[in-house]
Image (spheres, rainbow, N blue to C red):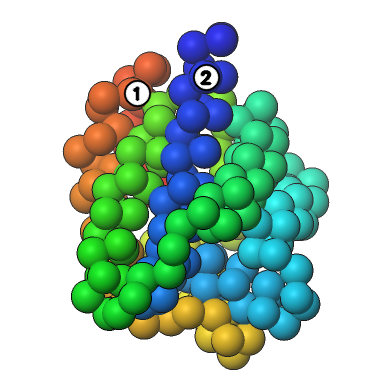
Amino acid sequence: MWKRLVLVETGLIICGFAFAIMLQAAIGLDPWDAFHLGLSIVTGVSIGLVVVIVGFAVLFLWIFLKQKLGIGTILNAITIGISIDLFIAVIPKAPDFWWGLGYFLVAILINGLGISMYIGAGLGPGPRDGLMTGIVRITGRPIWLVRTAIEVVVLGLGWVMGGAVGLGTIIYAFSIGPVVHVMLPWFNLDKVKEPEEVEGH
């Protein structure tokens, strides 16, 4: 178990590091993080704390979806947000678009590594992942439809609140899946199938 705990916590810290880089790249974010940033802008609360609060709010919905928590689920809800706030304080903002693009591409690889470590540890899905799978189970709708609906809603809300939506949003959508596909076998302790959802939190 200790090996899994080390793997999952290391992966989550790496994810927080990657998201901090993406934020400082300033060329757009994935749907959930655009939503987190939008909430941060509107409320004045740090984005890391917003990630933690949203994580636990989503976990509350698990009660109605009858989803089972894992220790990795709780660690996910706490660690990524704290890590984002710690790292964003020391990572400089990209000075221009090309630096931002470079930041973002590196962050994709780092994020893929962190997600693969977290998933590979097999200690429970992230709060937002479980929201999707719970809705799929209860409604019987296809996973692609539920995932798309959730991401369109949170992306739209994030955009309305001022969250970063742009080229990075598109790059993330098309690249994170293939990156995790390559890296997951390095850490997959249970040799489970690659999950449909690889948001990382």
Residue at screen point 66% across, 27% down: 71
Measured as percent of width and height from the top left, residue 46 is found at 70, 65
Q: Is residue 81 left or right of residue 120?
A: right
Instruction: Tell me which numbered mark, 1 or 2, is placed earlier along the sequence.
Output: 2
**Along the viewing direction, whichever of 120 and 29 lies nearer the viewer:** 29
Q: Is residue 66 above or below residue 156?
A: above
The answer, for residue 15, to whether it is visible in the render is: yes
The residue that label 2 is drawn on is 6
Would you call the spot at circle 1 few (<14 residues within 10 Å), some (14-19), or many (20 or more)?
A: some
**What amino acid is found at the position of numbered circle 1 in the picture?**
Asn
- Quadrant of the image occupied by residue 76: top right
Q: Is residue 174 above or below residue 114?
A: below
Label ID, residue 116: none
Is label 2 in a helix, a strand or a loop? Answer: helix
**What amino acid is found at the position of numbered circle 2 in the picture?**
Val
Residue at screen point 37% across, 47% down: 111
Is label 1 in a helix, a strand or a loop? Answer: loop
Residue at screen point 24% across, 41% down: 181
Q: Pointer 1 and pointer 2: residues touching (CB < 8 Å)?
A: no
The residue that label 1 is drawn on is 188
Would you call the spot at circle 2 few (<14 residues within 10 Å), some (14-19), or many (20 or more)?
A: some
Position of the N terminus, as image quadrant, is: top right
| Mark closer to the observer (1, 2) | 2
Q: Is residue 190 left or right of residue 10?
A: left
Measured as percent of width and height from the top left, residue 68 is found at 68, 34
Q: CA distance from mark 1 to mark 2?
A: 14 Å
